[in-house]
Image (cartoon, grey):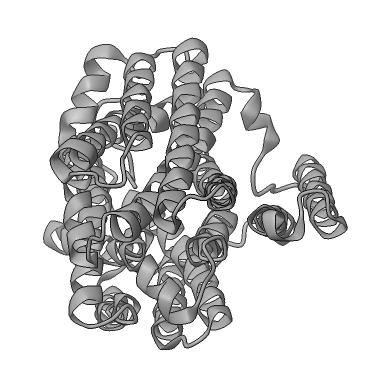
Amino acid sequence: MFDDARKRWWALYVLCSGVLMIVLDTTIVNVALPSIRADLRFSETALVWVVNAYMLTFGGFLLLGGRLGDLFGARKLFLLGLVFFTAASVGCGLANSQGMLIVARAIQGLGGAVVTAVALSIIMTLFTDHAERAKAMGIYGFVCSAGGSIGVLLGGFLTTTLNWHWIFLVNVPIGLLVYLASAKLLPADASRTGGVRLDFAGAITVTSSMMLAVYAIVNGQQLGWTSTTTLTLLGVAAALLIAFLVIESRVRDPLMPLVIFKLRNVATANSAAVLWAAAMFAWFFISALYLQLVLGYNPMQVGLSFLPANLIMAAFSLGLSAKIVMRWGFRGPLAAGLLFAAAGLAWFARAPLDGAFLVDVLPGMVLLGIGAGIAFNPMLLGAMSDVSPSESGLASGVLNTAFMMGGALGLAVLASFAAMRSQSLVEGGASAVAALNGGYQLAFLLGASCAALAAVLGGVFMRTRAAPVGAQAPAAH
């Protein structure tokens, strides 16, 4: 069946449609956050969980999803992931309470992790020719990048014309169509039970550790940073993280083989990814709030404001980043891209109460778009440069996991600092809007510091090697 090149490419388009739906949900929710906050009465810090519930389960089960695909078949897991994601989207769309929305978002993340993990595996199976595979990965990378632009625009349109519930309900018809097309077009694959053991303990301990840590940080200001509850939660999170490391060092088929971090470029790329993700997700989350709650933009205007950054990232994914890496290697471009991003965040850190789009918003968006567009590809290539081709999937999976976990934890930390700063300003006599803006400025400044530190790590410790021809970053969001 799949000797027919045309059917192979149709299968790719179906896979990319499924992944596009997942990518949409990483950006579409940001422009609707103020509406969700008002409707379901979220506090400023609790609102973080609408994003983090998704990110934590996504990051925590990304590697496990790949293992499940190896054991039970990638096609079967892709379809199952679509079912989970689509069903959870219904739950999100119908949510009428904070708890229901957060639980549904967590299930969305689980389904999204499975779909994303096995989609790349299926693409590698479909396209064995080097040139075809490079072209297929280029299309995949473009879809992931363009999904960011579609997400912010679609989120703004649906929230403005209908309501925030539809940013989730729109996934239902897409999910059903992708499921039917996938069932018809994707190749059947026999289960491979060659002794692969599922590291459920590793997935559960690391995800539980991150969730408890994020919960403690998000609620630390309200409960008290030295309160028994906060310290206990952080202690349990640390114990679970230690348990995860012990498990990974002893099980036969670890979720995240620790030996991979002995490789210098892998360790550097993942360290930089954690810091960059903390800055990136905080920027997306907090800038959407700044635009709506401080500048008074409606959701559609917020979506249009993000468009320059997302279009620039998409343009780099279509080949500009690969050309830069082929010309200058990946150490220099990685450091330069992260410095551009740091400059963009620093620009937002000075955003005033009466900011104008052309002066106070657009320059930061452009700098962040250029920075992310340049940095993602060399970060991925750096992570894979010290491993054999057979381990490249593992290396990219570990990097994606580090990125999602770093984003979740970083967002919690920076949002908490923003809330503390805002409360301090209110107690000092500032107006509510001025206090919010002061908190956002601090979060942007801390994000800029994270990105700058990531640039230093990449520039100092990464070893440049020749990049593989046609390599593309699988995602830029």
Question: At 37% across and 30% down in the image, what residue appears?
Answer: 346
Instruction: State the image coordinates of residue 266 (x, y, percent, origin top left).
Output: 54, 27
Q: Which of 276 and 388 lies nearest the eye of the viewer?
A: 276
Question: At 17% across and 79% down in the image, what residue appears?
Answer: 161
Question: At 64% across and 43% down in the image, what residue appears?
Answer: 256
Q: Which of 281 and 137 lies nearest the eye of the viewer?
A: 281
Instruction: State the image coordinates of residue 200 (x, y, percent, origin top left).
Output: 70, 61
Image height of 266 relative to 223, above or below: above
Question: At 35% across and 61% down in the image, what residue appears?
Answer: 30
Residue 143 appears in the rendering:
no
Q: Which of 69 and 419 lies nearest the eye of the viewer?
A: 419
| Relative horizontal placement of residue 283, taking residue 216 as reference (left or right) | left
| Relative horizontal placement of residue 172, taking residue 280 as reference (left or right) | left
Residue 154 appears in the rendering:
yes
| Relative horizontal placement of residue 101, taking residue 255 as reference (left or right) | left
Instruction: State the image coordinates of residue 235 (x, y, percent, origin top left).
Output: 84, 49
Q: How many marks?
A: 0
Q: Residue furthest front?
A: 429
Q: Which of 277 and 222 lies nearest the eye of the viewer?
A: 222
Image height of 102 relative to 421, above or below: below
